Amino acid sequence: MTAIDAAEPAESAVRPAWGGAFGRLWSAAVLSSFGDALRTAALPLLAASLTDEPLLIVSVTACGYLPWLLFGLLGGAVADRVDQRRAMWTVDAVRAVLVGGFAVAVALGHASIALLICLAFALTTLQTLFDNAATALLPALVDRAALGGANARLMTGQRVAGGLLGGPVVPLLLAAGAAAPFAA
């Protein structure tokens, strides 16, 4: 018997089930990432249509990233202490109301740089809680052996929806009207 024969067999990779709770989490996280990508790309473009001041335009963009620096760790701590499912539902419901109200404001011609800055900051602040809650919920939904694969699928879905698909859709939606990316 060789050392290789005596070694314990390596655990084969266990795939997480697409159905059930993991499938719902994956769908929610991917859809939310797609919406975040639409917002991240659309807000600065809308700001550029409202002003020629580069500092104001970059302020909108900066306020879309600043909450991660300010609240990213706090969002993780909060997500660990609350019901993650309820937090995700609540956060996305609040974001939907904010974005819906903003779409109405844009459609009625009431968009302003100040409103864009506030919206970018608020939506990204809420995103920190949603993303942290999704990450914290994952171990409760899949077996330990499937956690690596589930995490990979979740992150890949979010990156594809957010990074690859979300950005290119914005110009198409903006061609339909300034409020379209926020009504989608």
Image (spheres, rainbow, N blue to C red):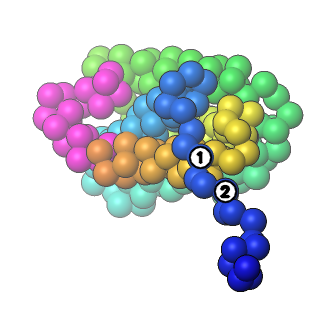
Please tell me which residue is depicted at 25% across the width and 26% down the height of the picture. Answer: 180
Q: CA distance from mark 2 to mark 1?
A: 8 Å
Judging by the rendered image, the residue that carries numbered circle 2 is 11
Quadrant where the C terminus is found in the figure:
top left
Residue beneath disc 1: 14
Image coords of residue 101 (percent x, y): 44, 18
In percent of width and height, residue 61 lies at 45, 53
Whether residue 173 is in magenta: the answer is yes
Q: Amino acid at mark 2?
A: Glu
How far across and how far down the image is residue 9, in percent?
69, 63
Dot label at residue 184? none
Specify few, some or many for label 2: CA neighbours under 10 Å numbering under 14, 14-19, or 20 or more: few
| Magenta-drawn stretch contains 104 | no
Name the front one of labels 2 and 1: 2
Q: Is residue 92 left or right of residue 51?
A: right
* Label 1 SS: loop
Q: What stretch of residues is rendered in magenta? A: 166-184
Q: Amino acid at mark 1?
A: Val
Mark 2 in CB contact with mark 1 (< 8 angstroms) = yes
Specify the quadrant of the image occupied by residue 75: top right
Residue in the image at 49% along x and 31% along y: 18
Question: Is residue 120 in view from this perspective?
Answer: yes
Local secondary structure at mark 2: loop
Farthest residue, direction right: 81
Res 171 quadrant in image: top left
Residue at 75% over, 65% down: 8
Determine the main secondary structure of the stretch shown in magenta. helix
Residue shown at 55% from the left, 43% from the top: 15
